[in-house]
Structure formats: structure tokens, C-alpha cells
Amino acid sequence: MSVESVQLSWSRPISAPPRVDRVALFVLGKGTVASSLLAQIGEHKARIVERDGLSLEIAGVCDRKSALFVPRPGGLDLADWRGALGAAPDADPRERRPFLDGLTRLGSRVSVLVDCTAADRMETLYEQALLRGIHVVTANKKPFAGSLPSFRRLQTTARRCRRALRYETTVGASLPVIETLKDLVRTGDRVELIEGSFSGTLGYLSNELLRGVPLSTAVGVARDRGYLEPRPQDDLSGVDVARKAVILAREIGLNLGLEDVRLTPFVPAELLAVSSPESFFEVLPTYDAEVAATVARAQAEGKVLRYLARIDPGQRRIDVGPVAVDVHHPAARLRGAESFVAFTTERYRDPLVVQGAGAGGALTAAGVLADILAIARKV
Ligand SMILES: NC(=O)C1=CN([C@@H]2O[C@H](COP(=O)(O)OP(=O)(O)OC[C@H]3O[C@@H](n4cnc5c(N)ncnc54)[C@H](OP(=O)(O)O)[C@@H]3O)[C@@H](O)[C@H]2O)C=CC1
Ligand SMILES: N[C@@H](CC=O)C(=O)O
């Protein structure tokens, strides 16, 4: 290369205006996580343009009943997205393909389907998105803890289509649990044990029960703070923790599913038989005394009640349930809605521990946003 051509190629980027790439998002859900995500995008949009050269545009948003698609540069006006969605026509949640096609037609540099629901059978929609060149970011655990063949097919489709499928927030909200585990596996470490307290909600409830707060009161506060699953029975049955454990187990190559988890619920089984969330909240106070007595028994023995998960790859075994731990146990020190995940590996004989608040709309939304930005910055 001549001196002249080097000077030319240097002078161009310095004088050119910084490039801004459009990132089109289609958001599923308008609940705790989705609404925090839209608020955060609205608040940080200008800074993200300036710092990362990325213009995040909401091309569409939907709930169970309606869907709104805004096929114009700039996307949805975030000042009144709720009103606009409220006025949008009804749309069958099983038929989202036209929105995916619309998203690809926008011609943005990056398109992302963002799932902030806990809906079943989203695997099909994710595959349809990936096949159209759309990346997927999701907080929904079900597609990763459900049918093993569907989960593996999804991973293969993402790889084949060279599109990202990111689900960091499915375990520990915005805590860097999944990427940490992926890095251990990618770099050839051997995971010997994964243990921890995977539920922000159950961590919070355990702490409140220890302070003498009735279960029903504590669950009400957890709901108001946005910690609970859309179906609170999923938290209190331990199924939400079991899903997280299955997700982590599959990351280390274990072909296990929910049916393999040895699960003991957080609350008496009869309470979990109540089907709707509304009736669940009604009958909850009936169980306050029984749950308080269990906590008191552990306290009388100088122990602390925690809800823990343990994944033992050697035994191909997952255990999830309440454990009365010694006061020196790492889980005994957790505060508020904190979670922790400890990885014992060939390299980390003293476990590598990820710990911090593990639930809540703002934190989870920040994790979803981080996943979106990680994709857009790479493309
Ligand atoms: N809250 C938290 O701390 C964390 C949550 N998560 C996960 O994030 C997801 C969302 O949680 P959260 O925001 O708290 O739940 P919410 O109940 O607040 O919101 C769920 C939203 O999903 C919408 N929805 C349900 N089914 C569909 C569908 N088929 N198509 C479009 N929209 C649908 C609901 O619509 P409608 O409004 O019509 O009912 C609702 O707006 C869950 O999977 C949860 O496990 C993950 C980590 C932490
Ligand atoms: N309900 C869940 C939310 C995050 O996954 C929890 O409390 O951990």
C-alpha cells in the first residue's frame, strides 16, 4: 500500500459523520418486564445512539389480545405506547408471522424479537424469526426448560441461521449467570456442581418469614414489587426454580427435563392445587400459620430456611427444595430478593459465585436490554 492510499483511508473515517445503525424491535408482552424495558429504551435512547451508534426503534408491541405494528422509521412513540396498543386491533397470539415479515421488510441493520411473556410454545415463533434472519432475546424460561428436542432444534436453527438467541435473564434476572456458565464450558472447564438459591421471590419470602411476616403478606409485597411470575403458583411450587435448574443443566450438556427434577414445593401441595392466580391469593392466608411453624422449627435449631437447587452432573441429578441451612452457609447471608449461583469446576475448586438481586422488572429489563445491545454491537 502506498503512503498516499494510507493517508486517504485514514482521512475518510475522521471526517465522516458517525454511522448510526437502526435496530428494530418487536416486543411481546406489556407487563412488568416489557413496560420497564420500553421505559428504559425511551430514557436511554439518545445516549445509546451517541455511545454505540445504535438507534433502538420499537417496530411493534403486543399483548395476549392486540398487536401494534409501526412500519415507519423511528418506530413507536414511547411517550404513549400503552394508549396506542390499547387502540390497536385484536390479533390472534398464535399468528405472529405477518409481524415477523413486516419486521424483515423494514430493512433495519438488526431486527430482534423480544419475548417478555411467560407464554407456552414460543419455540415455534422463535424458529420462524430466526429463519427470517431475526435475532431473538427472551426472558421466558419455558422454551428452554420444555421439550428437549425443541430446545436443541432451536439452538441448531440459531447456529445454522447465524442469528443470536439470548436468554440471560431466564436465570437470576440480570445477573450474568448463563454467559458465565457458557464461558466456562466454551473454554474447556469441567463443571462438577452447580448450587444456589435461584429464586428472587423465594429468597425474599424466606427472609420475610424469618422476620415473622405472614406468608400471605410477604407474597403480596413480592407481587407489588414485580418479583412474581405471571402465575404465582410457579414460584411457590418451586417449578420456576426447577426450570432455571434445567436451563443450567442443559448448558452443561445434560439431557434432562423438568420431569427429572426431584422437587419439593416451597408451600403445602394443597395450596398449589388452586388454579387461578386470583383464588390463589384468596386462600393463601389459610396457610400462614403452617408455613410460619416450619420456619420457626428451623430457627429453633439455629438454622435458616432457604429454597435451594443443586445440579450434580456426575449423578445426572437435579434437586430443588427447601433446606434448613447452617448460619455459615452462603445462602444464609442472602438479603432481600438476592439470588446466588455457585459453580464448582475443575478450575474453580472454591466455587465461582454470581450473587445479587435476582428478580424485579427494572433489573430484568436491564438484562434484556443488555442482551439486545450485545447482539446489535456485534453485527
Ligand atoms: N419479573 C421478574 O423479576 C422476572 C421475570 N422473568 C420472566 O419474564 C417474563 C415476563 O414476566 P413479567 O413481565 O413479570 O410478567 P407479566 O405478567 O407482568 O407480563 C406478562 C405479559 O405477557 C403478555 N402475554 C402473555 N401471553 C402472550 C402472548 N402469547 N403474546 C403476547 N403477549 C403475551 C401478557 O399479556 P396481557 O397483558 O394481555 O395479559 C403480559 O403483558 C416471564 O417469562 C418471567 O418468567 C425473568 C426474570 C425475572
Ligand atoms: N419469579 C422469578 C423471577 C425471575 O426469574 C424469581 O423470583 O426468581
Image (tube, grey):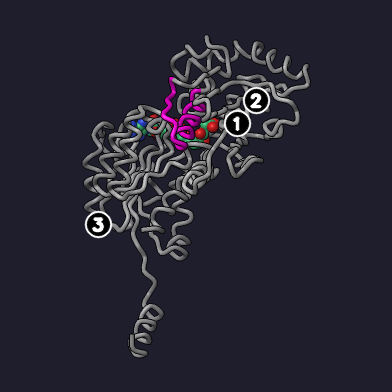
> Which circle marks residue 44 in the picture?
none
Of residues 22 and 334, the one drawn nearer to the viewer in this rendering: 334
Which residue in the protein does label 2 denote? Answer: 306
In the displayed structure, would residue 106 be above or below residue 117? Answer: below
Which residue in the protein does label 1 denote? Answer: 197
Mark 3, other Cα within 10 Å: few <14 / some 14–19 / many ≥20: few
Nearer the N terminus, badge 2 or badge 3?
A: 3
Q: Position of residue 326 (x, y in %)?
A: 74, 26
Task: Say which element carries label 1.
Answer: strand
| Residue visible at 42% across and 25% down in the picture | 257
Of residues 94 and 295, the one drawn nearer to the viewer in this rendering: 295
Q: How many marks?
A: 3
Q: Could you tell me the amino acid type at mark 2?
A: Arg
Prevalent SS, magenta region = helix
Instruction: Report, in whole angstroms, how far the alpha carbon at label 3 lies from the one at label 1.
Output: 43 Å
Q: Could you tell me the amino acid type at mark 3?
A: Gly
Nearer the N terminus, badge 2 or badge 1?
A: 1
Q: Are marks 2 and 1 in contact (CB under 8 Å)?
A: yes
Q: Could you tell me the amino acid type at mark 1?
A: Ser
